[in-house]
Image (cartoon, rainbow, N blue to C red):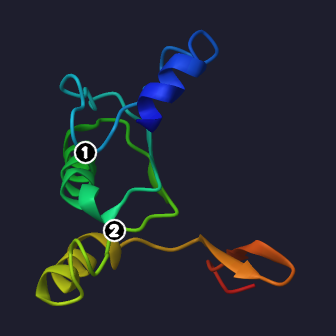
Amino acid sequence: GNAALARRDWAGMVPDCVQFSSCGGVTGSKIDVENDMLVFFFCPKASESDSVEKLLLETETKSKNLKLSVFVNPNLVDMGVTGFGMAGRMLRERLIDPLPYTYYLRTLSWGALTRVWPRAF
């Protein structure tokens, strides 16, 4: 959905080195990650957690130039999809807990962005 809209609406405005693709469902073709330097995951959902985990592992092992992977507002653990039991706990231990948090979105009376790393706001 969102990747297809971005490809359509931003055609010709984005350099060739930028690629939009989805993490779950139909991805169209195999994604080449060998030359990736930055990987951004925008709002990945719990239903996409398996695909996100596979893609992250693939980029970390196959990319020669990877510098940074960024998750923007992830929602990877959901009671209805992954549950908060063993499956949710294992996903957190494998994928979420090792990631350093730098900023996270939170509703505050004076704004929505909160700094977490290297120290809280």
Which quarter of the rendering shows the N terminus?
A: top left
> Among all residues in the image, which is located at the extreme right?
110
Note whether residue 11 is visible.
yes
Residue type at mark 2: give it: Leu
Q: Tell me: 112 left or right of 100.
A: right
Per the image, the residue denoted by label 1 is: 24
* Residue 80 screen position, x and y as percent: 25, 76
Q: CA distance from mark 1 to mark 2?
A: 13 Å
Residue at 20% over, 39% down: 62
In the rendered view, tell whether residue 42 sits above or below residue 103.
Answer: above
* Residue 6 position within the rendered picture, expressed as x and y whole percent measured from the top left: 52, 28
The label number, if any, that marks residue 76 in the structure image: 2
Q: Tell me where residue 50 sits by quadrant.
A: bottom left
Mark found first going from the N terminus, 1 or 2: 1
**Mark count:** 2
**Residue positioned 37% across, 36% down in the render:** 65
Q: Amino acid at mark 1?
A: Gly
Q: Would you say 27 lies left or right of 65 here?
A: left
Depth order, front residue of 79/29: 79
Residue 38: which numbered mark, if any?
none
Secondary element type, mark 1? loop
Q: Quadrant of the C terminus?
A: bottom right
Q: Nearer the viewer, residue 116 or 48?
A: 48
Q: Residues within 10 Å of mark 1 (few under 14, many from 20)?
A: some
* Residue 18 in sight here: no
Q: Extreme bottom residue here?
A: 85
